[in-house]
Amino acid sequence: MFREIPRKWVNAYLLIVLWYAINYMISAISEYQIFSPYTYVLWNGLYMFEVVCILVFLTFIYANFLFNYRIPVQVIGHLFGLTVNFMVMGSLAYFLESYLDGDVYMDDWINYLKELMSWRALRFHDQYIITVFIYYIIRYIDTVRDQEREKIELAIKNKEMQMSLLKSQINPHFLFNTLNSISTLIHFSKDKARKMISQLSDIFRYAMDSYDDQLVDLAEEIEFIDNYVKIQQVRFEERLQFVKEIEEECLKTKIPPMILQPLIENAVKYGIGPKDEGGTVKLTAKRIIGGGVYFEVRDNGLGSQAAKVLDGSSSGIGMKNSEKRLQNIYGPLTTFKVVSNKRGYKVSFIILNKKSNNNGYIVSDN
């Protein structure tokens, strides 16, 4: 049982005992040298100290028992414990100082305890009070640590969930269609099939290596988008065109990984795919006045006539997940602006510099 006691409680007990060992040693030696130069004074101090050691241990156990109840019950319980501690220590002091000298009657004991109710009682009360105080300090620290640990565990679970959502953005239908395309290409062009397999491998490697709190260069994200679009172009052939308008100075901009993929997928799946003649998806990234980078994904597909425009993944959380990730990193000002009409569909957002604010930006909505 004692082996299972946490080390912190053992250390607390030893510190309290050490404190009272010093106190009783100084008190006994002082009384021996100044008032009563008899050895029994030193022995009495030792006996009192031994009882204090036992009472401190029992007080820890008692406080731990009361801790399971409501505060009013704890207060009443500790008042009772304080009284019992005083009665035990007072009775022991009476036995050592008066009983052995011949004061053996009940009245003598009562009178002795009454005399202790003066300032002398403090030395008995503080033994209980200090022990309980230290107990509650340790429990408070434990509570704070437990809360912090729960927050950390919750953050880890939340991060794992975000990672799961992040990786689930690779649409299962996209994988299914890609494998079908590879199967078809094997019979007509093994080189194209191998290239498509390599592109698919790069896509999944990028997705698996991505972490929600990790930022990547825009250049890496563009390479990932290129692989994704090239695979889609095998399926849609000439019906899908992809145009990039990326300013070179933006390529080193740090962005969350896979933040653009749901927007591209949304444009292909709901804008271009269902349209008979197909269309064009355009990705834009440019510096803006006032600092920051402006991103835009635009298509000339079905637009407002599409069955869906705010999905972005088979799970229905692609767009929302991307926007939430942006806000977690860059703040609430970084939100998606969505425009959908008969001419097509557009999603845009701005990544702000740390020293920038939302004043003074000039962005064309044409």
Image: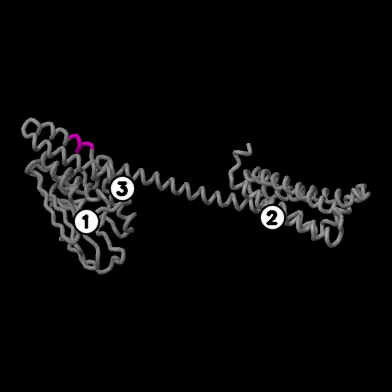
Q: Are marks 2 and 3 in contact (CB under 8 Å)?
A: no
Nearest to viewer (mark 1 / mark 2):
2
Q: Who is closer to the viewer here, 35 or 72? A: 35
Residue 81 spot, x, y in % from top left: 73, 48
Whether pointer 1 and pointer 2 mark residues with C-beta atoms closer than 8 Å, the reply is no
Q: Residue at x 33, y 45 (%)?
A: 162
Residue type indicated by callout 2: Trp
Residue indicated by mark 1: 348
Q: Looking at the image, is mark 2 or mark 3 earlier in the sequence? A: 2
Q: Which residue is mark 3?
A: 211
Residue in view at x 47 percent, y 46 percent: 150
Residue 316 visible in the current orientation: no
Tell me if residue 13 comes above or below residue 187 in the rendering: below
Real-space CA distance between mark 2 and mark 3, rounded to the nearest whole angstrom: 52 Å
Q: Quadrant of residue 296?
A: bottom left
Real-space Cα distance between discs 1 and 2?
68 Å
- Point out the stretch of residues depicted in magenta: 172-176
Mark 2 or mark 3: which is in front?
A: 2
Q: What's the amino acid at mark 1?
A: Ser
Residue 270 vertical position relative to residue 126 in the rendered view, above or below: above
In the visual, does 172 lie left or right of 105? left
Residue 19 tag number: 2
